[in-house]
Image: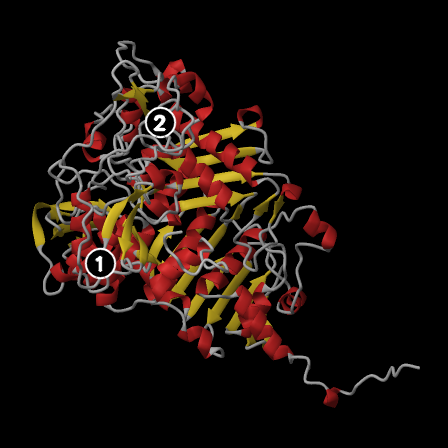
């Protein structure tokens, strides 16, 4: 007979946490920072059918958060219940959760968890009630007092001294500027999502923005982003048969002209069923629609509303409800792409049939073949190139025509800044660069591929790379094996029809010699370095990684990360004492968004440290008088906006608070722009110059953002991978 005795509490180390500890743990999941509290309170106001919401914060929300609305309001009984854990008026049970939540809040945690880590005061009076309202004071998870008070209809919530009883959480908050940037982003999102609600935001006594509440989305954009951005927005309207098959019922809102953009994703405001959320599928659909019209790491201004059945989207996948999950991400991506692209095409901001995903001109395959009569090696171009043809395809000829038209595809690739103007292919042909190749297809990618992306810091020769009639470059850095790669995405099923040589099925084709800067055959000699190991350059892998032999094995070097490190240390040296600055002939006025204007006040000293001198001449306008001159190039005045974004993002990620740390963060970003990008063919001379410059760096093994520059495979690892240590082999390298 088994012993079914229940052990006493004294016999176990597992015990139940007290209510206060549980409340603070839960608060940490819901209230991550001041912006989290603002989000919960603004959502409550909107759910209460408010027509006006006023948000006031002090010291980035750490000292005071005050949210006042004219919504339904609460009675005394409602207030007492509202601060208890898991109490809500928005859902009744699991059925409401599974059928799709229509309200912004639904968990019943906001007031209880905020009050657990702050001193919370709530004053409320029902909109249709008479008499006095009620004031409830809730401190550290306990109700301190409940009494009548005079107040207007609606609700006023004040959060004082946030995280006063959780000093570890308060300690890890960022700077005031960064914490306010988070708050501004939250309030802006809901102001744009509800143009029929008058929303205002005030920080340290200064009104940051205020919307009119008249139901005009364009007017709301004007209030939060300024006139320049508002005038660049175009409408998006697509529903029903206008969308590809998928869960979305409609896509509507505003998107900006491609040339009106920023270096931050913060201005991509997307909503699903009225809820401000982030979703990779939505962002990728937006960026896919812009295609090659945006440079690397540039993002448009977007306010986009997606409507979907409640059972097609799950909003209960994140403690702070800021992410959603669709039942078909791929279909959502296609639907958003189609809706935004249609709007851009309608306003003449995209070319019909522009290259999708890649901005490079179509690559022609160059096949070596033998002339049977003479025995010499020649090259054959694919029949899709327009050799000897005088007929130029038009956009209406379809995708196939555009794909084979070098003039069209090349001009599309180089039209980031002026999408309506055809430009020459010479810029790309001279450098052998696919302008913006990776960044267009991967919006979140690290590399910034700009028009001067293939400029090498050590100033290598710009000798043109041989090119085919289609405008694409011939890979001059193939190894002695001479393998020939086809263009990405190309269908090689027609190979047999094209090749007439008796050895067309061979894997390895005729070798292509690597060339030096002077055009002579590459020597392949080993180069000695001080910091780096001795290297013998073998060639390039995917025109992105340098392949080198060392005495101990094999080394791969990321050419972009290497050049970025070189440029970063040169910038550090240039800014070590006093940055070289260029005074402008006349001040240049820049209109800032509400977020940028607020950041300007906090980071003015850091801007001056870099050589940007500017004065505020209006609530949202600054006049730039001096700009930095770095790497023999003077920065444009409007780069000041990117610097502000870099400061806020740097502090957001690393907690950098000093001027020098903020400046250094921007130098890391600035070093990326002129660096050699991936998918860039290099000559041996250029490679050696880059390696010598890298060897001179203090830290040649990582880029300024922490990515590795050099990856090494020693001889032991290679032998193990090829299983050359099997019994009886005896380590004989000749076998």
Residue 586, labelled with which disc? none
Q: Is residue 316 above or below residue 415?
A: below
Q: CA distance from mark 1 to mark 2?
A: 49 Å
Q: Is residue 566 visible?
A: yes
Within 10 Å of disc 1 (Cα), the crowding (few <14, some 14-19, many 20+) is some
Toward which corner of the image does residue 218 lie, by quadrant? top left
Q: Position of residue 281 (x, y in %)?
A: 50, 42
Q: Is residue 679 above or below residue 29?
A: above
Within 10 Å of disc 2 (Cα), the crowding (few <14, some 14-19, many 20+) is many
Q: Is residue 390 above or below residue 303?
A: above
> Which of the two residues, 656 or 390, is positioned nearer the viewer here?
390
Q: Position of residue 61 (x, y in %)?
A: 41, 66
> Which of the two residues, 373 or 73, is positioned nearer the viewer here?
373
Name the residue carrying label 2: 350
Toward which corner of the image does residue 451 lie, by quadrant? top left
**Secondary structure beneath label 1:** loop
Q: Quadrant of the N terminus?
A: bottom right
Q: How is the image coloured?
A: secondary structure
Marks 1 and 2: which is nearer the front? 1
Q: Is residue 149 visible?
A: no
Toward which corner of the image does residue 14 lie, by quadrant? bottom right
- Of the numbered discs 1 and 2, the one sitting upstream in the chain is 2
- Residue at the right extreme of this rendering: 1
**Secondary structure beneath label 2:** loop
Cβ atoms under marks 1 and 2 closer than 8 Å: no
> What residue is drawn where x is 31% and y is 31%?
360
Name the residue carrying label 1: 534
> Which of the two residues, 422 or 319, is positioned nearer the viewer here?
422
> Which of the two residues, 69 or 262, is positioned nearer the viewer here?
262
């Amino acid at each position: 007979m088994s012993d079914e005795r229940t052990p006493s509490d004294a016999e176990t180390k597992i015990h139940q946490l007290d209510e206060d500890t549980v409340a603070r743990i839960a608060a940490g999941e819901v209230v991550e920072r001041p912006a989290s509290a603002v989000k919960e309170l603004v959502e409550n106001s909107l759910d209460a059918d408010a027509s006006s919401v006023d948000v006031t914060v002090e010291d980035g929300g750490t000292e005071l958060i005050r949210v006042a609305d004219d919504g339904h309001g609460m009675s005394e009984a409602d207030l007492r219940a509202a601060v208890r854990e898991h109490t809500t008026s928005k859902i009744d049970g699991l059925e409401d959760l599974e059928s799709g939540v229509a309200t912004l809040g639904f968990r019943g945690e906001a007031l209880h968890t905020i009050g657990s880590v702050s001193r919370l005061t709530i004053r409320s009076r029902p909109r249709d009630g008479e008499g006095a309202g009620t004031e409830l004071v809730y401190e550290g998870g306990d109700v301190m007092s409940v009494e009548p008070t005079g107040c207007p209809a609606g609700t006023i919530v004040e959060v004082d001294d946030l995280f006063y009883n959780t000093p570890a959480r308060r300690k890890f908050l960022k700077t005031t500027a960064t914490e306010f940037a988070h708050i501004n982003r939250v309030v802006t999102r809901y102001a744009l999502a509800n143009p029929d609600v008058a929303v205002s935001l005030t920080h340290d006594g200064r009104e940051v923005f205020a919307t009119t509440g008249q139901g005009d989305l364009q007017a709301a954009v004007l209030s939060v982003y300024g006139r320049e951005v508002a005038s660049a927005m175009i409408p998006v309207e697509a529903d029903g048969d206008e969308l590809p098959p998928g869960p979305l019922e409609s896509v509507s809102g505003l998107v900006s002209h491609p040339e009106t953009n920023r270096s931050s994703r913060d201005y991509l405001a997307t909503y699903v069923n009225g809820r401000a959320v982030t979703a990779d599928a939505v962002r990728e659909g937006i960026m896919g629609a812009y295609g090659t019209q945006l440079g690397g790491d540039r993002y448009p201004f977007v306010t986009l509303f997606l409507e979907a059945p409640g059972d097609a989207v799950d909003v209960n996948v994140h403690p702070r409800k800021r992410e959603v999950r669709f039942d078909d991400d791929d279909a959502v991506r296609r639907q958003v792409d189609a809706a935004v692209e249609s709007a851009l095409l309608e306003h003449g901001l995209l070319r019909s049939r522009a290259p999708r995903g890649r901005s490079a001109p179509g690559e022609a395959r160059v096949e070596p073949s033998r002339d049977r009569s003479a025995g010499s090696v020649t090259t054959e171009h694919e029949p899709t190139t327009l050799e000897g043809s005088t007929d130029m395809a038009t956009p209406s000829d379809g995708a196939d025509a555009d794909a084979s038209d070098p003039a069209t595809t090349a001009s599309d690739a180089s039209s980031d800044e002026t999408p309506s103007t055809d430009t020459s292919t010479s810029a790309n042909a001279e450098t052998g660069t696919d302008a913006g190749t990776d960044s267009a297809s991967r919006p979140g990618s690290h590399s910034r591929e700009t028009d001067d992306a293939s400029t090498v810091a050590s100033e290598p020769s710009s000798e043109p790379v041989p090119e085919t009639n289609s405008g694409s470059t011939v890979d001059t850095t193939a190894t002695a094996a001479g393998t020939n790669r086809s263009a990405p995405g190309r269908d090689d099923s027609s190979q047999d029809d094209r090749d007439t040589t008796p050895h067309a099925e061979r894997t390895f084709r005729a070798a292509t010699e690597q060339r030096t800067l002077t055009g002579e055959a590459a020597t392949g000699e080993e180069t000695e370095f001080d910091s780096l190991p001795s290297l013998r350059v073998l060639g390039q892998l995917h025109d992105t990684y340098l392949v080198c032999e060392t005495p101990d094995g094999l080394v791969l070097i990321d050419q972009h990360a290497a050049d970025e490190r070189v440029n970063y240390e040169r910038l550090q040296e240039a800014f070590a004492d006093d940055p070289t600055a260029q005074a402008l002939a006349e001040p240049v006025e820049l209109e800032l968004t509400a977020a940028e204007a607020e950041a300007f006040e906090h980071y003015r000293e850091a801007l001056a440290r870099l050589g940007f001198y500017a004065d505020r001449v209006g609530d949202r306008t600054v006049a730039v008088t001096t700009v930095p001159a770095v790497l023999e190039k003077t920065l444009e005045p409007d780069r000041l906006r990117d610097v502000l974004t870099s400061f806020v993002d740097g502090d957001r990620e690393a907690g950098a608070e000093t001027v020098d740390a903020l400046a250094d963060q921007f130098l890391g970003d600035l070093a990326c722009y002129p660096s050699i990008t991936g998918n860039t063919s290099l000559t041996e001379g250029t490679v050696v110059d880059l390696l010598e410059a890298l060897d001179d760096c203090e830290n040649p093994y990582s880029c300024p953002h922490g990515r590795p520059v050099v990856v090494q495979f020693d001889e032991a690892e290679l032998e193990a991978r090829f299983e050359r240590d099997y019994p009886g082999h005896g380590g004989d390298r000749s076998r």
